Image (cartoon, grey):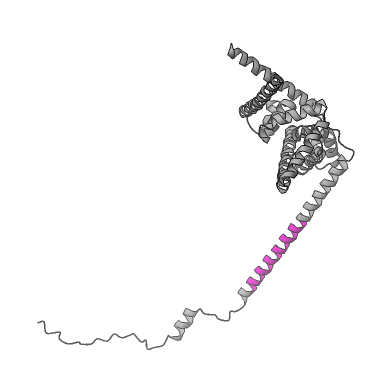
Amino acid sequence: MLVDATLIERARGGDEGAFSEVVQAYRRRVLGTIYRLIGHRDDVEDVGQQVFLRLYLSLDQLRTADVFEPWLHRLTVNAAYDYLRKQRRRSESRMSDLPEQVVQLADAAAGSGRQHDDTEKARIREFVQGLLASVSEADRSLLILKEVEGMSLKELEQVYHVNENALKVRLFRARQRVLKVLSSRRESAQGADSRG
Amino acid sequence: MEDKTRTNTEEGLERELDTLFAAYRLACPEPEPSPNFMPELWRKIEERRSVSYSFTRLTRAFVTAAAAICLVLTLLQSTLKTQPSLYPQTYVEALADASADDSPVYSEVSFYDIGGGDNYQ
């Protein structure tokens, strides 16, 4: 734990100073997780504030300070889901409002924008996000928490309230799906290389 | 031989995926929160608090008004019960009283001799 259990108990009791300290201790970690879950930086801080707002409103429901971190992880994952769902609805409605030609122009502009963003990190982000797009939102967050955030199965059990075996099955299936996409991409890249 | 090649390919892909996930973690570093993070968070908390406070006040006012109406109705009902009623009898009782006299209409049964009673002897 990044903070002492007594600090969390004080925050639970309504001590605003203690709550601020808890936020300051965890905000970087929370923002990092959100960034990896939603994939872009613009709204990370806004979603992070949503997480801590929900934490503030629900802190009195926390049974013990021991389960604070899984609780915070769960709030983080839920807030990221909500954000992604809203974004999808917004982009769907935006795209459905536009005529075909404008959509094509937007795609072309996005493509040229990507060309400008030629750093190695951006390329990796785009590539991994493309791979992760092959699984559901729930499985994507599970994979990110396990493989990228490095959470153990025990920790994930507490976040998802699902037993270890069920989590292993879900992780295995999600990983297999991602591997399949990776394999097909590699094959198509090799095909392009051999043609070239 | 073919199986071995396939296993090697799968293992290679597994390793590549692990490397990609590790690289993704480095490509998405923990963002530094802006100096406005805490003030903005407290503004949102205050905003939510004031909304829930108004809602609590509204709910309390509604409950108080409902309790007052219940009290008034209960008092009104008990007051009406204690007052002498305009009609002390029910309709059936009043009807029974009105028709109660000393010569009941159907008190006697009349027997009529329709005759021919001895014809069967």
Asked if one can make out residue A54 in the rendered structure from this viewpoint, the answer is yes
Please name whichever residue, A132 or A15, is drawn nearer the observer in this view of the structure: A132
Q: Position of residue B30 (x, y in %)?
A: 82, 30
* Number of numbered markers: 0
Image coords of residue A18 (percent x, y): 84, 38
Q: Nearer the viewer, residue B27 or A95?
A: A95
Q: Is residue A86 visible?
A: no
Q: Seen in the image, is A116 located left or right of residue B73?
A: right
Q: Position of residue A85 (x, y in %)?
A: 71, 41
Q: Is residue B62 magenta?
A: yes
**Image location of residue B48, percent across then percent down:** 80, 49
Q: Residue furthest top?
A: B1
- Quick check: A75 above or below A178? below
What span is colored magenta in the figure?
B56-79
The one of A153 and B65 positioned closer to us in this rendering: A153
Q: Residue furthest front?
A: A196
Image quarter for residue B14?
top right
Relative height, residue A124 to residue A89 (above, below)? above
Main SS category, magenta section: helix
